[in-house]
Image (cartoon, helix red, strand yellow):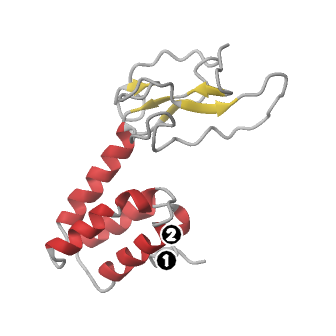
Amino acid sequence: MITIDGFRTAKICSNGHMITDSAETINDNSKFCKTCGASVISKCPHCQSRIHGSYHVDHVVCISSEEAPVPAYCHNCGKPYPWTEATMRAAEHIIDMLDELTAEQKKQLVDFIPDIIVETPQSRYAALVYANFLDGLQGLAVDCFKDWCKKNVFPALLVLLNMQKQ
């Protein structure tokens, strides 16, 4: 079993479904996801680094049914994984359908997408900007965008977006 940096290799479909967080110990040769049919990857498409899965320490037994979280960005090159890119594209398309917003407001929301799906120093500000723009808007696109937020936004920011109680 090879774990260069302590991390085992994860196998994740291009839509972000975890196949295994320990490819070295779980013999799963799936090429496609059984949930959505998307192709399965274990390396970053940009730099070919192994995708980090569970963390392993020799001679330490960890009894947990929790699998490693699906990473949003590559630990080696910093580029988004395919599922992160797809999430950001979906948000861009929904934002484009918010007809009540100006082109400048839409651009600002699009620019802040990376700051609301993972925690960054700008995340709280980005959430407040989103809440301000979305406050009072109605319609199917707004409902779709709020649903997208509930599934993809960094959880601590949902309170600031008025989508979750403290």
Find out whether the residues at labels 1 and 2 contact each other: C-beta distance under 8 Å.
yes
Please name whichever residue, 41 or 80, is drawn nearer the observer in this view of the structure.
80
Q: Kindly identify which residue carries mark 1.
A: 160
Q: Is residue 13 above or below residue 121?
A: above
State the image coordinates of residue 162 (x, y, percent, origin top left): 46, 79
Name the residue at 77% across, 27% down. 57
Residue 159 lies, in percent from the top left, at 52, 75
Q: Residue at x 39, y 40 (%)?
A: 79
What is the number of the mark on residue 157? Answer: 2
**Which of the 4 image quadrants contains residue 65?**
top right
Q: Which residue is depicted at the point 67% across and 41% down? A: 66
Q: Looking at the picture, does residue 83 appear above or below residue 92?
A: above
Q: Is residue 9 left or right of residue 42?
A: right
Residue 156 locus on image (x, y percent): 56, 67
* Quadrant placement of the C terminus: bottom right
Rendered position, 88 above or below 128:
above
